[in-house]
Image (tube, rainbow, N blue to C red):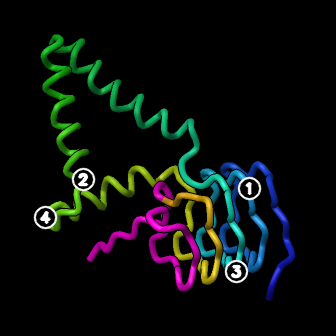
Amino acid sequence: MTTEDSYHSQDLRGQSFQGADLDGADFTEADVRGADFTDASLVAADFTSARIGVRPVAAALILVGALMVSVAAGRAHGGIAAIVVSMPLVFISRRALKADERDRPLRYVAHRIVTHRGTRFAEADVTRATFAGTTLTHSDTSGAVLDDAVWEPGRGPLVLDND
C-alpha cells in the first residue's frame, strides 16, 4: 500500500510515526529531529533536505549533563577533582569515536546514548528511501532495512553490529 502523504516542510519534531505505513510519503525539507519511525514502513519515502537527528534541546542536555558531573566533582573535592573527572570522560569519548575493534562495546554504548534522543528508524523499512541533503549520524537505524536507500557519500547512518 502506498500513501500520498505530504509532510513537506512541516515541523514534526518529536512526533511518533511508530508502525505507520508511510510508503512514498514526502518529508522533503521537514524537521523530523527526534521523531520516532520505529517499525514504520517508509519504502520510497523522500527525506530530501529534511532535518534529521538530535533536537537541539537533547544535544544541549547531554553537554549540560557532562558539565554538571565535572562541576559537582569540582565543588565536592576542589578544582583538581573536576579535571580528574573530565579527563577520563574525554578519553572515553575519543576512544569511542575510533573504529578500533577493541572498543566496539564502548562505541556501541556511546552510539546508543547519542542516538537515544535522535530520529529513530529502528526496525523500519526504508528500502529505496531518499535522504539526499541530509545527515543520519545521530539517528537510530538499528535493525532497519536500508536496501537501496539513497544518501550522499559519508552522510549515511552509522551502522554498528552488536554481536
Kindly report the distance in space between the C-alpha atoms of the residues bearing marks 1 and 2.
Answer: 31 Å
Residue 157 among magenta residues: yes
Which corner quadrant holds the N terminus?
bottom right
Q: Is residue 30 above or below residue 89?
A: below
Which residue type does callout 2 highlight?
Answer: Ala
Residue identified by numbered label 1: 29
Q: Are the residues flagged by discs 3 and 1 in contact, CB closer than 8 Å? A: no
Q: Is residue 22 above or below residue 83?
A: below
Tell me what residue is drawn at x 70 percent, y 54 percent. 15
Which residue type does callout 4 highlight?
Answer: Arg
Tell me what residue is drawn at x 39 percent, y 57 percent. 112
Whole-percent x and y of residue 122?
Answer: 52, 70
Image quadrant where residue 70 sits: top left
The residue range painted magenta reads 137-163
Sequence-earlier tag: 4 or 2: 2
Which corner quadrant holds the C terminus?
bottom left
Task: Give the overall secondary structure of the magenta segment.
Answer: loop
Q: Are the residues flagged by discs 2 and 3 in contact, CB closer than 8 Å? A: no
Question: Of all residues shown, which one is farthest toward the bottom?
Answer: 1
Residue identified by numbered label 4: 102
Kindly report the distance in space between the C-alpha atoms of the residues bearing marks 1 and 4.
Answer: 39 Å
70 sits left or right of 30 in the view = left
Whole-percent x and y of residue 154?
Answer: 44, 64
Image quadrant where residue 80 sits: top left
**Mark 1 or mark 4, whichever is nearer to me:** 1
Residue identified by numbered label 2: 96
Q: Residues within 10 Å of mark 3 (few under 14, many from 20)?
A: many
Sequence-earlier tag: 1 or 2: 1
